[in-house]
């Protein structure tokens, strides 16, 4: 069955796509970090790699077996701590790339 057209005769908009998976969001974050920080990106890359490992462990690709609920809890706690540390490091690196001069008003 075809969907009904809109009042002005246009076909209806396609259904919205599901939200991006966590790894896709991490990829986008890594691109933004590289664009904003340049070579300073290396200061946070190990943390982003650790985040990627945690995400893959929590949601294994393909038919990978999920960890036990207790292990998932541990992985989530570690992932949360790593994300918080990455946030702190990113904030510090962003301050490092901002111009030093202050504008007086």
Image (cartoon, rainbow, N blue to C red):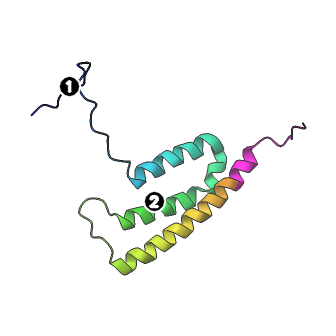
* Residue found 44% across the figure and 73% down from its top: 75
Residue found at the far left of this picture? 1
Say which residue label 2 marks: 52
Left or right: where does residue 105 sit relative to residue 80? Answer: right
Between 26 and 7, the one lying in front of the other is 7
Say which residue label 1 marks: 5
Left or right: where does residue 56 sit relative to residue 91? Answer: left
Left or right: where does residue 31 sit relative to residue 90? Answer: left
Is 103 situated above or below 85?
above
Q: Position of residue 55 (x, y in %)?
A: 42, 62
Q: Position of residue 50 (x, y in %)?
A: 50, 63
When asked about the image quadrant of residue 71, the answer is: bottom left
Residue found at the far front of this picture? 7
* Residue found 52% across the figure and 67% down from its top: 80
Between 3 and 58, the one lying in front of the other is 3
Which range is magenta?
A: 92-105
- As helix, strand or loop, the secondary structure at mark 1 comes to loop
- As helix, strand or loop, the secondary structure at mark 2 comes to helix
* Residue found 50% across the figure and 59% down from its top: 49
Which quadrant, please, contains the C terminus? top right
Is 102 situated above or below 43?
above
Q: Earlier in the sequence, mark 1 or mark 2?
A: 1
User: CB atoms at circles 1 and 2 under 8 Å apart?
Assistant: no
When asked about the image quadrant of residue 45, the answer is: bottom right
- Distance in Å between CA atoms under marks 1 and 2: 43 Å
Residue found at the far bottom of this picture? 70
In this view, the mark in front (1 or 2): 1
Q: Is residue 62 magenta?
A: no
When asked about the image quadrant of residue 82, the answer is: bottom right
Q: Position of residue 27 (x, y in %)?
A: 46, 48
């Amino acid at each position: 069955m075809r969907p009904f057209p809109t009042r002005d005769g246009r076909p209806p908009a396609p259904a919205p796509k599901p939200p991006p998976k966590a790894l896709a969001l991490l990829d986008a974050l890594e691109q933004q970090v590289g664009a904003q920080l340049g070579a300073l990106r290396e200061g946070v890359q190990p943390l982003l790699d650790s985040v990627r490992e945690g995400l893959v462990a929590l949601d294994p690709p393909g038919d990978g077996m999920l960890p036990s609920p207790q292990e998932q809890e541990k992985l989530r706690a570690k992932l949360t701590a790593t994300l918080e540390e990455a946030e702190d490091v990113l904030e510090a690196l962003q301050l490092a790339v901002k111009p030093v001069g202050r504008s007086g008003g």
